[in-house]
Amino acid sequence: MAREIRKRVRELTGGKGLPVVSDSVGKDTLQAALDSLQLRGSLVSNGATSGRPVIDSVKGSIWLTGPAMVHDATPRTHMPEMARELFDHVLARRIVGKPKQQSALADAADAHRALESRRTTGATALAP
């Protein structure tokens, strides 16, 4: 059933999925509801006709999200605008950061080894 629902939703939405799904059935339809969502979509599980979804019955009324930066930058055409917005904030000094450590550019390999071995905290800057 879940596969047929997902397939039909994808057909109706041109492959995108839905921004929000409200599932009032519960356990039997949870996977189909999840499969029908678009990136960054929201699922509201508000019923349990077929039983509470496992996560809901274990934890109670919760808000669950699993963000990943790759989805925020999808499609790739969004990335230049996101970068512009970020750098506008930096240039306006609404976002200010200070590196926790700094290395000479000539010591970049050592700086990378320190990052890889987790001997650093916060930002690391390379300076000429």
Image (tube, rainbow, N blue to C red):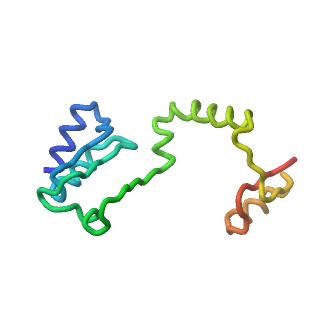
Q: In this view of the protein, which residue sits in the foreground, 125 or 104? A: 125
Locate residue 21, reporting x and y percent. Answer: 26, 43
Q: In this view of the protein, which residue sits in the foreground, 53 or 120? A: 53
Specify whether 90 is left or right of 11.
Answer: right
Total marks placed: 0
Locate residue 4, reporting x and y percent. Answer: 15, 45
Specify whether 74 is left or right of 121.
Answer: left
Instruction: Report which quarter residue 106 is drawn in.
Output: bottom right
Locate residue 124, reporting x and y percent. Answer: 75, 55
Specify whether 70 is left or right of 113.
Answer: left
At 79% from the left edge and 62% from the top edge, which residue is drawn?
A: 110
Q: In this view of the protein, which residue sits in the foreground, 37 or 65? A: 65
For residue 58, above or below residue 48: below
Instruction: Report which quarter residue 49 is drawn in.
Output: bottom left
**Residue sitting farthest toward the front:** 61
At 74% from the left edge and 44% from the top edge, which residue is drawn?
A: 96
At 34% from the left edge and 45% from the top edge, which residue is drawn?
A: 42
Specify whether 56 is left or right of 82.
Answer: left
